[in-house]
Structure formats: C-alpha cells, structure tokens
Image (spheres, rainbow, N blue to C red):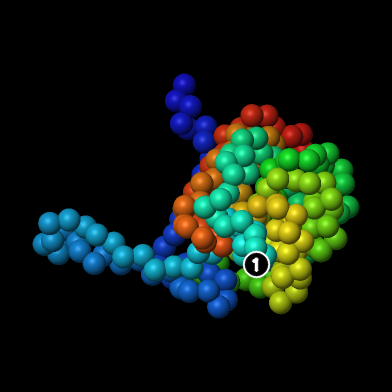
Amino acid sequence: MNREREWIDISVPLSTGMVHYPGDSVVQIEHEQDIARGDVATVSRVCLSAHSGTHVDAPLHFCEKGRAIDQCPFDAITGRARVIQIRDDESIKPSELETSGIKPGDILLFKTRNSRLWSDESFNRNYVYLSTAAALLLAQKKVRTIGIDYLSIGGFEGNEVEAHRILLEASIWIIEGLNLSSAPPGVYEFVCLPLRIAGGEAAPARAIIRPLSRVPRS
C-alpha cells in the first residue's frame, strides 16, 4: 500500500486574486523570468499578506509581547488532532463543544459549512465563526491549537478581536483558512508547518492530515 495516498491536504492553494480577508493584500504571483519566454530559468515573485490562504496566527498577532510565528512549538502544529463536525450554521457554541470530550493539550480542527465557501470567487462575510463563549471554554480547557475552515476565527465585524485575544492570551495557536471538505470527523495524524518568518505575527502554511480512527457520526 502506498501510504502517501492516505494523506489529506487540508490547505488552500495560493493563487493570484484568490479570496482574501477584506483589507489584507491581494495575493499576486507572477513569473519575473520564464523559460517559456526564452529565459534560462523560471523565477516567480510572490506578494501576499501573512494571513493569506491557510495560515497560522501567533500570539504576537494580538498580544504585544506574545510569541512570534518563528517561536511556534512543534507540538502545537504536529501530532494527534481531531476534526470535529460543527452543525450550527451561525457559530461554534459551547453546547456543541461540551459533548466532544475536549482535553488539555488537544489540537482541534473545526469542520463547518465554511469548507464549501472556497468555491466562491469573493469573500463571504456570513461564515461560521467561534463564539466568544466557546473561545472562553477552549481557553478554560487549555487546548493547544484550534483550526477553522475560513479566513478568521472570529465573526466579521463582530467578535473577531475578542475571540483572537481570548485564545492567543491563553497561548492557544490559531490555524485559519483550512479546507476540511475531504476530512470526515475523526482522529488524525497532523502536520501544519508555517513559514519561519523571523518576528512574524503569522505565516502561510501547508497542512496535511492522515486518518488514525474515525469518530462515529451521530
């Protein structure tokens, strides 16, 4: 068996003009040199926000003295992770999390209807976000890392700042911009490596998972 086929890529490809959070830089990728144009090699120029596509937020994003992305511990972005199905169409609430058996140190990836939004050409402001009450619960539970399948953990023009601060001040690392459409709820081997940007508050990342077991659907 080719074990490579078992890996599921849950990151979003970076491409010119892709969906981005309002106010962030538009992703631009161009060939400054191109073999097809007669150059000896192909060389690309990439311009983007650190929060483009799939990316990891470090505490420094909202905490002045928080750790930077190049200080991210490997046990926050690799290891055992759980994909949890969220059925609420508005937000992630404590009522759905309290039955999930969350433990300290968990890496939790929330699968919502957001994963279907990646086919949209423009940013969708009506995405599922983490409620403030749920953020407080996760901080109390002392989870290690959480991920969500759109470009922000907080609600657009809502609790975005509050949700980020609650999590990051609790030293919970945040992964945004996942695509979990091909990942059934369950337990996975998880790898998510952000670029090592010195002093950065965030960085684009490649995220992959491999099934360890399946959580029965309710």
> How many numbered marks does the figure carry?
1
Q: Residue furthest front?
A: 65
Q: Position of residue 189 (x, y in %)?
A: 60, 34
Task: Report helix, strand or loop for mark 1.
Answer: loop
| Camera-side residue of 54 and 136 | 136
Q: Is residue 38 above or below residue 17?
A: above
Q: Which residue is mark 1?
A: 64
Using residue 41 as the reference point, say whether residue 17 is left or right of it.
Answer: right
Q: Position of residue 78 (x, y in %)?
A: 58, 39
Q: Disc 1 residue type? A: Glu
Dividing the picture into quadrants, the one containing residue 63 is: bottom right
Q: Position of residue 92 (x, y in %)?
A: 78, 57
Q: Residue furthest top?
A: 1
Q: Mark 1, residues whose alpha carbon is within 10 Å: few (<14), some, or many (≥20)?
A: few
Question: Residue shown at 55%/60% (left/top)?
Answer: 202
Question: Residue shown at 69%/73% (left/top)?
Answer: 156
Using residue 216 as the reference point, say whether residue 200 is left or right of it.
Answer: left
| Camera-side residue of 75 and 82 | 75
Asked if one can make out residue 48 in the rendered structure from this viewpoint, the answer is yes
Question: Residue shown at 78%/46% (left/top)?
Answer: 142
Q: Position of residue 9 (x, y in %)?
A: 51, 44
Question: Residue shown at 54%/64% (left/top)?
Answer: 51
| Quadrant of the image containing the C terminus | top right
Q: Is residue 149 above or below residue 63?
A: above
Dividing the picture into quadrants, the one containing residue 184 is: top right
Q: Is residue 80 above or below residue 110?
A: above
Asked if one can make out residue 134 in the rendered structure from this viewpoint, the answer is no
